[in-house]
Amino acid sequence: MRFAEQATIPTAMLGTLQALPDTALWHRLQKEGRLRDEGDIDQMSLMNFVPTRLIEEIAREYIDALWKLYDPIRYLNRTYHHFVKMGPPRCAGAKKKIDWISIRALLILCWRQGIKRESRWKFWQNLAGILRYNPRVWADYLSVCAHNEHFLEYRYIVRDRIERELADYLAKQKQPLPQTDEQDRLTRIAS
């Protein structure tokens, strides 16, 4: 996450390590008996293998990193610094026709990020900075600011799914292993 902040990368992708089928990692983990057969392989799930560290720690760290990465103020700051560093475009872009869809999107963005959220002062401060230091990119800047609308909701979805998977995983770890036929026979004899 620190890299994204330092490099001013507005939209950074984050996910847990997954052992993809038929790769060297997958074969090694399969040989070690550490592959888990449950779940999908995507950025919204726990690892599909048993790690050497506690999976609870890794899950918490992942959720925390995602939460910080798409915190509204951090995102606005990364986006602002990115567009200030970028400088003005070298060639003129195509003139975009202003339509009601664009106006509506701008009004929704200004409502959500400029009025509704606690980060509203940062939104207006950064927009004023863009208009002052790099005014030719204001529309693109606002477009990237709008991307965080997705990520703000996305981090809740990921957190809920990871926590559900983690609870299921931990519950399965606490269940006793199924008895073999011999153990079952000995248990019946002992009773």
Image: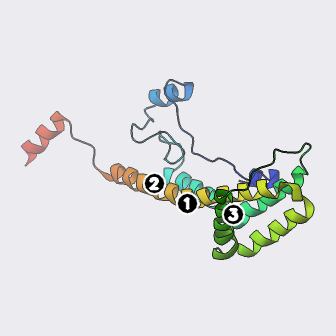
Residues at circles 1 and 2 in contact by the CB criterion of under 8 Å = no
**Number of other residues with Cα within 10 Å of mark 2, as a class: few under 14, some 14 to 19, many 20 or more:** some
Q: Kindly report which numbered mark, 3 or 1, lies closer to the viewer in this rendering.
A: 3
Q: Secondary structure at mark 3?
A: helix
Q: Which residue is mark 2?
A: 161
Q: Which residue is mark 1?
A: 153
**Number of other residues with Cα within 10 Å of mark 1, as a class: few under 14, some 14 to 19, many 20 or more:** few
Choose the circle earlier in sequence order: 2 or 3.
3
The colour scheme of the drawn protein is rainbow
Look at the picture and state if 49 lies above or below 125: above
The residue type indicated by label 2 comes to Arg
The residue type indicated by label 3 comes to Leu
Does any portion of residue 71 appear in the rendered image?
A: no
Residue at the image position 46 percent from the left and 59 percent from the top: 160
To which quarter of the image does residue 105 belong? bottom right
Residues at circles 2 and 3 in contact by the CB criterion of under 8 Å = no
Q: Secondary structure at mark 1?
A: helix
The residue type indicated by label 1 comes to Glu
Residue in the foreground of this view, choosing between 33 and 112: 112
Q: Which residue is mark 3?
A: 106
- Disc 1 versus disc 2: distance between alpha carbons? 13 Å
**Number of other residues with Cα within 10 Å of mark 3, as a class: few under 14, some 14 to 19, many 20 or more:** some
Residues at circles 3 and 1 in contact by the CB criterion of under 8 Å = no
Place of residue 77 in the rendered image (x, y in percent of width and height, measured from the top left): 78, 63
